[in-house]
Amino acid sequence: MTRAPKNLLNVRTLLLSYLKNLDPAAVGIVGDPAHRGGYHCGSDRVVTNDYSVVESPRDRSGLTLDASGLDIGSFTARSAGRTHDLRSFSVWCVQQCTAGAADTRDVREIIYSPDGKVVRRWDRLGKRTTGDNSHLWHTHFSFFRDSTKAGRDQTPLFRRYLTTIGLLTATNTEDD
């Protein structure tokens, strides 16, 4: 049975701790039982020629029962007189991936909407550029399956975002 790995559960916990109006039901890792294929499924629910397995050696070698996707729903956060939301967060994360930030090396793709009108996809492998309209109101992160299998900490990117917008400070980053 597909399971949520500890490293993605840690990201979920971090986000829910600091983004106070982020609904826990809007931060998902394992797809519902009808979900077949993709990064929200483990080895028991991938399909033949599933893109989340066959397009990268990192995914083929990392396939386990663990899901390797994370959905984040709408939120707003005020800090230092500014409002931050799912859209600005998503754009920031894509910018970090595009720039090659070290803490993004395990991110395979981000499916998001920069404006609530169009869906875009940043894909490290350059295979796709868009996604379905459900991504108008949530952002999807896929992590290469080998990083999930290895249990690599995926919180640094998200901690850096929370620090950048002022919700997390250097004094409380180690206490979480």
Image (spheres, helix red, strand yellow):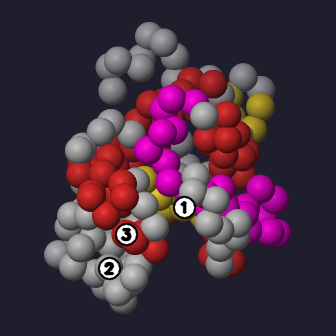
Mark 3 and mark 2: span between their CA atoms?
Answer: 8 Å
SS for dot 1: strand
Q: Is residue 13 above or below residue 39?
A: above
Q: Which is more toward the observer, 165 or 92?
A: 92
Residue marked by disc 3 = 53
Residue beneath the point at 81% across and 59% down? 115
Mark 3 and mark 1: span between their CA atoms?
Answer: 17 Å
Mark 2 and mark 1: span between their CA atoms?
Answer: 17 Å
Q: Point out the stretch of residues depicted in magenta.
A: 101-123
SS for dot 2: loop
| Image quadrant in which the C terminus is located | top left
Q: Is residue 95 above or below residue 137?
A: above
Name the kind of residue labelled 1 in the image: His
Residue marked by disc 2 = 46
Name the N-terminal-most of marks 2 and 1: 2
Name the kind of residue labelled 2 in the image: Val
Is 23 situated left or right of 87 in this image?
Answer: left
- Please state the horizontal and vertical placement of residue 133, each as a whole percent of the image: 68, 78
